[in-house]
Image (tube, grey):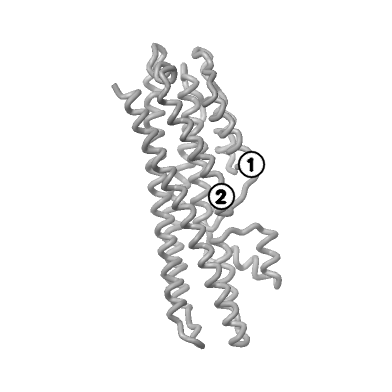
Amino acid sequence: MSTSIATLKASGHARSSSVPSISHPVVSRVDDLLCRLRTSEAVTSSSSSSICHNMGDINNLYECVDDLLQFPFTQQALTGQDRNEKWVEQVLDGSLRLLDVCGTTRDVLLQMKESVQDLESSLRRRKGGEFCVANDVAAYISSRKKVSKVISKCLGDLKRIENNNISPLDKEPEVASMIRQVERITLSMFESILSFTSGSKARSKPINGWSLVSKVMHSKRIACQETEMNINEMEKVDVALKTFLGHKSSSCKEIDELHNVKKQLVALEMSIQGLEDGLECVFRHLMRTRVSLLNILSY
């Protein structure tokens, strides 16, 4: 986890002393979910299953936020005499920013899924004994690099957003502070998805060709190394492709390696589909939350 994210989470607990604390079961539920998501992020995992699990909590979180925004005491807190245009602007900008990042993340996943499906189709068309798939793999790697450039830019934008939204605002209602905390944790979730798609564990630099694969290939026990390094589905495809292309022995062994490539591609496609399904639900919640905020604050 980056230092900036950790700082944001620490600062997210600050609340306005001028606004009374809101006591309600939904508020307690939001606090519990935020705490769970922060704890989950502290134990970094790059697998799609862990990201999907966190997305489930994110969706539950927005269910609570949607309920919270319908309560009269919430609307009164957001539109009362202590209303400050600075935090109103930040809350509204934040809701729009989340939709933009969500859209970019969905596009990245779609492009990656299409690249995986193209490679799968190419491998299925290969006849028995024909294993010259270097061009197909090269096209896949080229697509990966293009996607990685988009991801790198988006991750840079996220880091700048984090750095610009650290300090609590003056006279910020508790509910506004809570909404900004939800925004931070949601942006962090998007960062996890983008890092997964780039084949990196939130590293500062995007993947460079077969850098990770080369390290794994130094070991003869690749399966064991995969477990030890906790590499994700994207990286497992890289390992399988490198093993297949680097194999120079019997055709039987090549068939086994090609079968493994296909198996890993299927697993990756399923992982991406799971992330897409989760993001679709998140997107609907983000739209609903923004509409509610606009109805409350824009008058």
Identity, as a three-letter code, of the amino acid under mark 2: Ala
Q: Secondary structure at mark 1?
A: helix
Q: Amino acid at mark 1?
A: Ala
| Quarter assignment of residue 71 | top left
Image position, residue 77 (x, y; %): 43, 17
Q: Secondary structure at mark 2?
A: loop
Place residue 213 in its image quadrant. bottom right
| Quadrant where the N terminus is found in the figure | top right
Residue at image mark 2? 202
Instruction: Provide the residue designation for mark 1.
Output: 42
Q: Residue at x 58, y 52 (%)?
A: 46
Residue 160 to residue 200: above or below: above
Q: Examine the rendered structure and indicate whether residue 134 appears above or below residue 149.
A: below
Name the side, left or right, on which 174 lies relative to 222. left
Question: How many neighbours does mark 2 have within 10 angstroms: few (below 14), some (14-19), or many (20 or more)?
Answer: many
The quarter of the picture where the C terminus appears is: top left
Measured along the vertical axis of the image, is residue 98 above or below residue 143? Answer: above
What residue is shown at x 38% (from left), y 47% (from top)? 103
Front disc: 2 or 1: 1
Q: Residue at x 39, y 41 (%)?
A: 284
